[in-house]
Amino acid sequence: MRVLLSTWAWRSHFYCLVPLGWALQAAGHDVRVASQPSMVGPITTAGLAAVPLGEDLDFAEVFGGTIGKVGQLDDTEHGDALVPEITADGGVVRYAEAILDDLVAFGRAYRPDLMVWEPFNLAAAVASAALGVPGVQHLWGPDSSTTLRLDHEKVVGPLAARCGLAADDVSRYGGYLLDPVPPPMQVPLAGPSRPIRFVPYNGPAVLPDWLREPPRRPRICLTAGTMMAGAGLLDELDVPGTVRALSTLDVDVVVAVDDARLGDQPDNVHRITAPLALRLLLPTCAALVQQGGAGTTMTALDCGVPQLILPHVSDQYFNGERLAATGAGTWLAPAEAGAAAIRDRVADLVENPRWREAAGVMRDRMHAMPSPADVVPMLTGGRP
């Protein structure tokens, strides 16, 4: 079969598709990955064939100042939770407009038998309908879109009209959702779903010398993911203050954040200066402190590592709330995240076995889900 994967131009959103792309290729299917030209590097580095389409957009410019909180609608514990909207003139639509025509044209030439896309990729959903090709949406984590307001007619209608369709002709989810999130992490989904195991992929992976031996004392990883720096939001995080707080504990701190504000650090702080995939680092860690991105959160769950999320924008709040529901970690809103609070929460994550026990339960639940290789026959018609 010919399978067309499609991702919008942000590499961490693409990463959830990579293990399925590998599985499809290993089963003998022809796989292409369509995205904007800036994604050629991440796609080809992952060993998949890139199809550059449309025009590149500046993510920071498109979304600057518009990335709000995404949290539970009934959140009262932390107050002031906002309910963002996807609007007809917003960044999600602008990305769709930049690739839609080329995506449909390529689809007519390539004639895929199946399309797979990740959340917020409206262009792929419209193209699937325009081409009459079965499609599915592959979630990257807990489905934060369930807390968004989206007027389907206003948002999808103009995109659909470019292909001679009505808004109701387009399903943002395709036939069903591929869901990598076990309970109680996931929320009720908006459409039918099928389980698929989350297999961590964080980009190129090289194991450094210092990571080849087990740590002599508890190791803590601090990361900010890919979006905060890429969207010009790193200043939202007090990385130097967080490092200082963690360094006062009897632990080794690995800082996986390229932050110019970090100066000289104590001996128990190790700054990573070269790319390092979290899937290599986290199995050696006693805890993770992070911003709350879905890929980071899911990778830590897959490794059975307790987490502290310090959210600032987007679905980070939502992921913090969902993580807390599992018992495998906790989160602190910005107003609560002072140095003492961070230090005390991380000390508890390391010292209290309940956190690692809960993280181990979630890891085992994830590992019991059907692998991408197991899911391929269902996707390609081998079994329901």
Image (cartoon, helix red, strand yellow):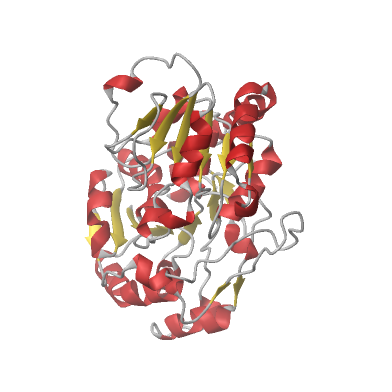
Residue 106 appears in the rendering: yes
Residue at x 59% of width, y 70% of height? 84
Q: Quadrant of residue 114?
A: bottom left
- In this view, the residue in front, 119 or 84, is 84
- In this view, the residue in front, 345 or 16, is 345
Q: Is residue 113 left or right of residue 367?
A: left
Q: Position of residue 257 (x, y in %)?
A: 38, 43
Q: Position of residue 296 (x, y in %)?
A: 47, 43
Q: Position of residue 256 (x, y in %)?
A: 38, 38
Where 65 sits versus 206, above or below?
A: below
Residue at x 62% of width, y 29% of height? 349
Residue at x 31% of width, y 43% of height? 25
Q: Is residue 55 left or right of residue 157?
A: left
Where 199 sits versus 189, above or below?
A: above
- In this view, the residue in front, 230 or 335, is 335
Q: Is residue 29 left or right of residue 78?
A: left
Q: Position of residue 208 (x, y in %)?
A: 28, 25
Residue 370 appears in the rendering: no
Total numbered badges shown on the rendered structure = 0
